Image (cartoon, helix red, strand yellow):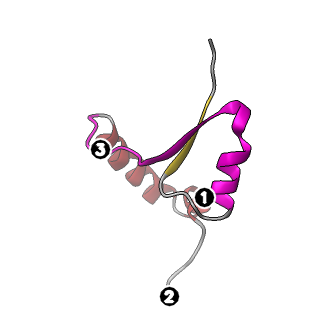
Amino acid sequence: MIQRFENRTFPQHDPTGNARDRAEFTELWRPGRISPIIHARFPLARTRGPHEAVAVRMSVGKIVIEIDLG
């Protein structure tokens, strides 16, 4: 029988599998073998844009909200 759960609850349902996956991800991420696809970047003052893009499923990849610490 296949147990189903949401991705965000995976660590609670399978801590061993989560630790394994995090270690594998880190091995790929640190040397730059994988990287996220950035769909768009928005300044913090325009947060409505990214929320709308996600809500209507117009984004492919990650939406970045940039914060000017300047």
Image quarter of residue 58: bottom right
Q: Position of residue 15 (x, y in %)?
A: 51, 56
Residue extending farthest to the top is 70
Which mark sits nearer the N-terminus, 1 or 3?
1
Instruction: Give the amino acid at mark 1.
Output: Arg
User: What residue occupies the far bottom of the structure in this picture?
Assistant: 1
Q: Nearer the viewer, mark 1 or mark 2?
A: 1
- Residue 57 position by quadrant: bottom right
Rendered image quadrant of residue 42: top right
| Dots 1, 3 in contact, CB < 8 A | no
In the picture of the structure, the residue carrying the numbered disc 2 is 1
What is the secondary structure assignment of the residue under circle 2?
loop
Within-10-Å neighbours for mark 3: few <14, some 14–19, many 20+: few
User: How much space separates mark 3 and mark 2, taking CA atoms?
Assistant: 31 Å
What amino acid type is highlighted by mark number 3? Leu
* Residue 24 marker: none
- Position in image of residue 36 (x %, y %): 41, 46
Query: Which residues fall within the magenta stretch?
Result: 31-55
Decide: is 68 above or below 70: below
Secondary structure at numbered mark 1: helix
Q: Position of residue 28 (x, y in %)?
A: 29, 44
Residue at image position (47%, 55%) is: 18
Q: Nearer the viewer, residue 32 or 60?
A: 60
Between residue 13 and residue 35, name the one nearer to us: 35
Q: Which mark is residue 28?
A: 3
